[in-house]
Image (spheres, grey):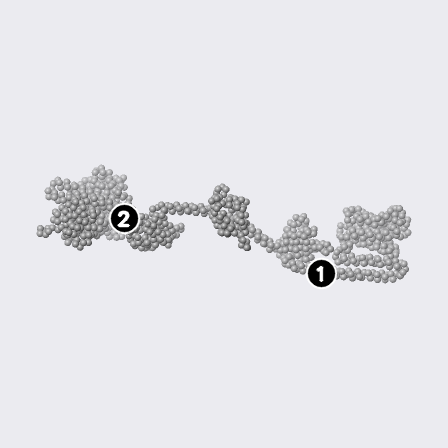
Amino acid sequence: MSETLPAPLVLVADDDPDILDLVRYRLERSGYEVATATDGVEAVRLAGELTPALAVLDVMMPSLDGLEATRRLRNDPATAEIPVILLTAKAQDADVQEGFLAGADDYIRKPFSPRELSARVQAVLGRR
Amino acid sequence: MVVLGTAALVGWALQSRSLTDLGTASSLKANTALCLVALGIAVLLMGTERQRLRTVLEVAAAVVATATILEHARARSLGIDELLFDDRFSPIGAAGRMSLGACIAVFLAALGLLGLDSLRRRVRVVAQIPLLGAGAIGLVGLVGYASGLNSLYWQTPVTTMSIPTAAAILILVSGALTLAPVEGLSAIVMRPSPGGRLLRRLLPVVVLLPTALLIPIGRGADAGMYGFDVGVLLFLIGTMAVSLPVVFWTARSLDIAEARARQEAARFSSVLRAATEQSIIGTDVDGLITVFNEGAERMLGYSSEELVGQETPALIHDPHEIATRAKELGIAPGFDVLVAAARRNLAETREWTYVRKDGSRFPVSLTVNAMRASDGSHEGFMGVAFDLTARKELERELRRQADFTGTLVGSAPVGIFATDDAGACIFVNSKWRELTGLSGEEAHGDGWFRAVHPDDLKQVSQAWESLVATDAPFSVEYRFRRRDESVVWVACRAVALRNEQGKAEGYLGTVLDVTQRRIAEAERERLLAQSRSVLDATTDGILMTDLGGEVLFSNAAMDVFWSDVGLSGLGTIWDRVDRLSRLTTSDDAYQRLLESVMLDPEGEHVGEFTLAESGRSFVGRTASVRGAGGVLMGRIFSLRETTPERAAARAKDEFVATVSHELRTPLAAITGYSELLEDDLAPLGGEALQLLEVVQRNAARLARLVDDLLLLQQSETAGVNVNLADADLDEVLRDSLERIEPAAARKSIAVHLDGDEGLVLHADVMRVGQVLDNLLSNAVKFTPGSGSIAVRVTREREICAIEVEDSGPGIPEDERGRLFERFFRSRDAIAREIPGTGLGLVVSRRIAEAHGGSLELADGEGSGATFRLVLPLARHAANYPALKPVAPHADTPLE
């Protein structure tokens, strides 16, 4: 990670503030800039405004869930290129499939290891 | 004559010449008078019962006459001549002796009279000859006296007799012949036949005429008026002159009579010939056949020539009938039986059986009459017979028909009744009486209405009235109620009996017992209604069609369904399904159903669909229906709404998702922050780090527990989802063994792996790893310190078996059955406070089964337990049928 380059901005959205803080804390430690949202609508709005390098979205959120938010991002040319990692407490494989269908790049189940999350974010960004 | 003789006897007694001579020149001798009196009395007694007296008198006269003849012949007196009286008057001959002529005449007369008494016909006929002889002697004597030709009474000894004697003899003979006229000469004279008539006409001419002529001619000659030769000539001429006209007249009348007879005969024979249809048989008095007409020939097969004059009609009669009839009449069998009535002048008509020449028989009606001549004399019998065969046949046929009808009506298993033209009952048969319990008399007129059940009376009487009034067909089913209150259902039909003019003369009806059918119908209705109500009470829709898909039956639930989807009253089931499929979320449902039914018309087909508009879901089934004898009848369609189940399943899914989210999110916070803490504490080391590890371990355990619970729940609603792929078993095993290594090391437990290597599974690596972790973790938990665990891999054809054996205490017999129950914990585990949830084995088995494999306790006996996991191998996986997802477990839902 170089001093000269600005840290990549990661958008994190979760309705649970503890999880939101956990993810934000871990990613900031790993050197990312983090913007947070507490629901899907806000997440989509921020994504449009900030154009983050990546978005970590919780699936189960009020007003607009992570899947729908992912779809909206993909449908908007301005945000269509933003990679999305879905974070979900849903365990079933069908849910995973649905997530990928919606356009997610990765899928992390709760409970998760913050180290693993960080590694995956790095992996997705590195792929780009 | 008796008077004459008696007078002479009295004269002799008084010696009175005037009385003995009776005014003639000759005297009647005493013996002669006696004989004449005896014979006279005998003649008077003729026809009476005094047979013996007659015979005595006749014999006495004959004896006297014979004795006197002997005196004449021997010329000497036997002393009988003057036995009674002295003869002082006789100028000639012996005193008091009967003249020879008188003797002979008396003798002949006595002889004749005796003969007439004979029992033999021939003797009676011959007896008339001596009588005639006596008469001739008397006649000659009288003629001699009358004509003066004394030689006739005087000079010929034979004819010598007195005038009274001659007259008396003549009277005696003619009297005897008149009184006994039935046979012989007199009978001939008396006959009504032409011969009799001829005799009656010619006899006076032959007998009286010469006598009458002889007297005047004789007297003339005696008086000397002419000579004897002239007298003879006169006699000849006179006789011829008188007799010739009589002979011609007689001949002519005979001609006329014969012509008349011939005409009659011709008429008779033409009648006989004309009567070809009747047998006419004539007989004489004795029964000999005299007439046998053509009709008789034809009827009987005999020719006239065969029978006439030879046989009696008894020949052509049935001898048995003759014998029977003879017994009735009390006479001997034979011809007389046939003419018994006719003999009494009664015409009789009877039925007899004739026997043909060929022996065959036929019935006849025979009328027998006596035939009489014009003068009433009995000539014979005439029998006229009609062949009754045809009539008998007809009678038999009519009787047979009557019997047939009677038997039919009487024995028919249906009630039969007949009414007059007004509809009043006049006849009922026995079955009708049996059905109604009424007698024939009770049924008469309107009586039969009494048997009709009161509830049906109005219907029956209306129908009956309209039959009688307007000839409306009468066909009614109603009940009879008997006196004992028993009820019988009948089907009654009635029709008018019409005469040739088409007018109803009466009505004929039949009454059929349909009680059994009615009972069966009622039972069927009841069963149908019962089935119907059962079917209507079920919440599933049920519908049946014929082979063409026409709806035969549809229960209430099905009707409600069609009405809900707006397809009520549509045509065939296929039309309905077609229309229905357009209302569902999958528009090719109809096509798929049709195809599968066509592919397997007799199989059962199940399909699930959801109505697009209401979101209601249904499971439909259809199967073929076979009737009696296995004949394909149609299809049955059933429909069950699954909307509530769907909703429940959805609710459960949502619940699981929510629980999962609500549990995992805090877990994620715990584990996540623990990890952050760990990162911060790790460089420092110390006790806090160890404490944090306890937190992390328990958080991980809790996370696993949540996973197990959710997996279990998932397996029960939708089955465990496995992502199958080829997987290296060695690698899966190695990963699991690595994960268990720290726990095993802590208890100094050795873990051995042996068996086949290099096997490739077709499995979900994650899930299989989870199962192996479970088994190894259990083995470590239950194996005492310094024990050992053996893992063996065995390839068995298309599968592989992985056995995990520990050296623990094993599993008690009574706990083995419950080992795979949810939340089951063994007594040993509880007693030793070994941690566990009782879900591991259950979830592991579900996972194994989701792979088409199995998980069992292979050996729990003695030292240690052995669990055997069976999984499919990759090379055969494609053909392994159990690999398809198995049905969800429904036995233990997780609420």
Q: Amino acid at mark 2?
A: Val
Q: Residue B340: give x, y in percent of width and height.
A: 68, 51
Quadrant position of the C terminus of chain B in the picture: top left
The kind of secondary structure element at disc 2 is loop
The kind of secondary structure element at disc 1 is helix
Foreground residue among B155 and B805:
B155
Per the image, the residue denoted by label 2 is: B886
Q: Is residue B187 left or right of residue B234?
A: left
Does any portion of residue B490 appear in the rendered image? no
Tell me if mark 1 has few (under 14), some (14-19) or many (20+) residues whose alpha carbon lies within 10 angstroms of its own. few
Foreground residue among B132 and B420:
B420
Q: Is residue B793 left or right of residue B286?
A: left
Q: Which mark is residue B262?
A: 1
The image quadrant of residue B843 is top left
Q: Amino acid at mark 1?
A: Arg
Residue under the point 17% across and 55% down: A77
Q: CA distance from mark 1 to mark 2?
A: 134 Å
Does any portion of residue B873 appear in the rendered image? yes
- In the rendered structure, the residue with mark 1 lies on which chain? B
Q: Residue B247: give x, y in percent of width and height.
A: 79, 61
Furthest residue to the left? Answer: A4
Badge 1 vs badge 2, beta-carbon distance below 8 Å: no
Q: Which mark is residue B637?
A: none
